[in-house]
Amino acid sequence: MANVGTAIFHALSMAFAMFWEIFWALALGFFISGIVQAVVSKKEMSRWLPDDRPSSVWKALGLGAASSSCSYAAVAITRSIFRKGADFTAAMAFEMASTNLVAELAIIMAILLGWQFALGEFIGAPIMVFLLVFLFRRFLSQKLVSQARRQADKGITGKMEGHAEMDMSVAEGPILRRMLSDKGRTAISHYFVMDWVSVWKDVAGGLLIAGALAAWVPRGFWNAFFFTSHPTLAKFWGPIVGPIVAIISFVCSVGNVPLAAVLWNGGSSFGGVVAFIFADLLVIPVLNIYRKYYGLRMTGFLLVTMYVSMVVAAFAVEGLFGLAGLVPHEHKARIVEATVTWNYTTILNIIFGALSMLLVIRFFRTGGIKMLQMMHSTHPRSH
């Protein structure tokens, strides 16, 4: 019994250590996201994404990077703008960018995995999106899109419907004035808290799973699973199996980065880790939401085309970074025992903890509770 308790404590300690390392990065990322969402209206998105031309896809990438990092919110927003007239292909490009090009993901990847992974994600994500666009143009029929639109118009609920419809953006005046206005500061505080509420379960789940795997699963298992002793085979195997591990892990959004750190330390190839992080929009709960939103046939189409895009993009990143000599030689992601020392992490956590507290206080003083209720409502209203 004592050994069981020790093992559980060890796993929880590992999870806390990773949370301590990434808290300030999450707070900073959500603060940046809140600012952007406060000055960019969701109502304009559908008009900016009328087709699948490269210009529209690039706009989708930019809008996605400025959006919430929550996978469930991204999926709900995508259906919302699709129902309002956005092109399906461009809407899906937005969805993939909104969880792969956001600031908090890059910062957390840089902290836990290294700057090479953050750079690989930002280079690989556009490659993945344009591969998806190519596959859509080649294989997606108008009949299937029409079926998906009819299903989407039924309004069947998934998750984060209120978050998808919530729009508190400030449209009048220069951007700085919008941000500093009373309405702008309120909007930033609301989006900040909403993003935390959106992802906390995934972040907590990812940390707990990563802590358990780091503490309990011997490295020899991962080395065998990823064919670490066969480097050439490992480079091909990693991107193929990475998304599959993501699908069955149930962890999406930024919550899968700690688990990616465990996989990297276990011997996964560079491309395998990148592919794993790409696949947060293919976890089983999200696939079930696709089924509700767009129907079973479109869900199958999205699963196959997204998987192929992720794998090929991960191969491309592996090859490009290998040629450039940017793939880290040592598998030493930042997974440490729970310690709190006076260093830059502690200082940043104090600073962004104080900022978070100020935003939370403003959130509650400006009708935040009602906004939370709207966020989880099955019949949300635009604000």
Image (cartoon, rainbow, N blue to C red):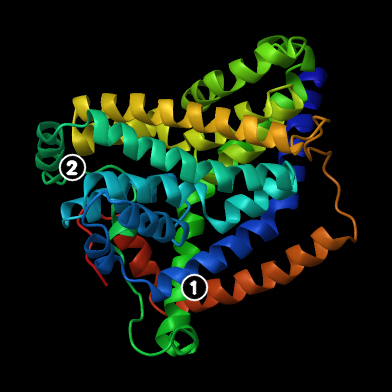
**In the displayed structure, does residue 339 sit left or right of residue 134?**
right
Q: What element carries label 1?
A: helix
> Compared to 37, does 203 lie above or below?
above
The residue that label 1 is drawn on is 35
> Compared to 81, does 286 lie above or below?
above
Q: Is mark 2 on a helix, strand or loop?
A: loop
For image coordinates 71% across by 43% down, the residue present is 116
For image coordinates 78% across by 35% down, the residue present is 328
Task: Please state which amino acid type lies under the numbered disc 2.
Answer: Ile
For residue 156, the mark is: 2
State the separation of the CA atoms marked 2 and 1: 30 Å
Image quadrant in which you'd find residue 85: bottom left
Task: Please state which amino acid type lies under the numbered disc 1.
Answer: Ile
Where in the figure is residue 162, as x and y percent of width and height? Answer: 30, 57
Where in the figure is residue 168, as x and y percent of width and height? Answer: 34, 74
Where in the figure is residue 102, as x and y percent of width and height? Answer: 52, 55
Image quadrant in which you'd find residue 66: bottom left
